[in-house]
Amino acid sequence: MLEPVTEANEKLTLFCSIDGLAVEHKVRYGQYDMKIKHFHPEYEIFYILDGQRDFFFDNRVYHASKGDLILIDSNLIHMTKSTGADDIGHNRIILYITPDKLKDMESRYPSLGLTRFFRLNYGVYHLNEDQQDRFMNFYYKFKKEYQDKKINYKLSMELSVLELLIYMTRDLKKSTNTESFTKDNKNYQHAYEIADYLSVHYRDDIDLDFLARNFFLSKYYLCRTFHEITGYNIREYINIYRIRAAKQLLEETDDSIDEVAGKVGYHSATHFEKIFKSYMNISPLKYRKQRNIYVSMIPVVDHLN
């Protein structure tokens, strides 16, 4: 899962990956909108060295620029896109952490409360100079250890991530999180209202005619505005919420595939399986089997003294 993806209008400066941890440093030139409408199990720590980006999550758009850090929780539905036609590009570093690695760290250092920290504190943060220097020091150390590959370099890389996470759990919760971005624009207000509705009613049978009537908007305006603000089209947004809910049911219940499909809003198990595979690259049944195999291999760790 942790593999670099490079396109013609970008330069991959660094990609290094070890045991559930990866750092990617990439420069993109000109306008760039995320093409994969997604959520993913990895946790992300996204730092902007130069330029600016708009992030969409929690049904709102947040603006981030040079020196900002963005925490992205596991399975958070999100999108990042250009800030406008005058966007000349951006330079960013991303630290990826797989759920397995975060759980492993948390089992060894439970006082950090890492899973809870990401769940409660994801968002955009304006870092002060000391915090910016701290992140860059982490990056240089992680990079040098990977390049030199001296004895125990993987352990040193992991310890540098742990040190960064310790600082974040201390400092970031004290920072002022950015407010959602509206530009006092009716388009943003309409898109937010629609996103709020879909995130609650994604299991229902919803079509454009219904939404247009419900929000007193034309279908053309509704579709154009929602996509322009969020980066998603209506059907994608509904499907992503449904698939995320289906993942949870597959992991936490013994419901059949037909039952899962029905509970998240699909009338046909065949259609559900097709959509699930298009987002997860695996069938629902195989996803459940793989998940069950992984869970059965997790050792029981007792942290009580």
Image: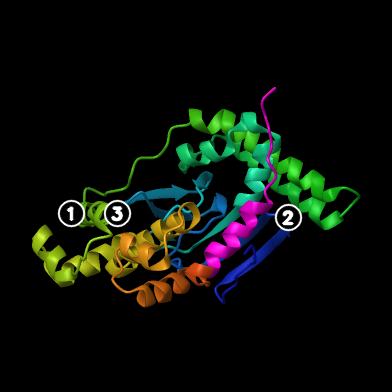
Assess whether residue 287 is covered by the magenta stretch: yes
At horizontal 40% and vertical 49% (from top left) the residue drawn is 63
Residue 4 location (% of width, % of height): 63, 67
Q: Amino acid at mark 3?
A: Ser
Q: Which mark is residue 199?
A: 3
Q: Amino acid at mark 1?
A: Lys
Residue 239 location (% of width, % of height): 35, 66
Magenta span: 286-305
The residue tagged 1 is 186
Looking at the rendered image, the disc whose residue lies closer to the viewer, 2 or 1, is 2
Element type at mark 2: loop
Is the Cβ of the residue at disc 3 closer than 8 Å to that at disc 1?
no
Q: Quadrant of residue 84?
A: bottom left
At horizontal 13% and vertical 70% (from top left) the residue drawn is 209
- Taking depth in this image into account, of 253 and 277 the one nearest to the observer is 253
Inspect this view and state whether residue 25 appears. Answer: yes
Assess whether residue 234 is covered by the magenta stretch: no
For this orientation, the residue located farthest to the right is: 151
Q: Which mark is residue 19?
A: 2
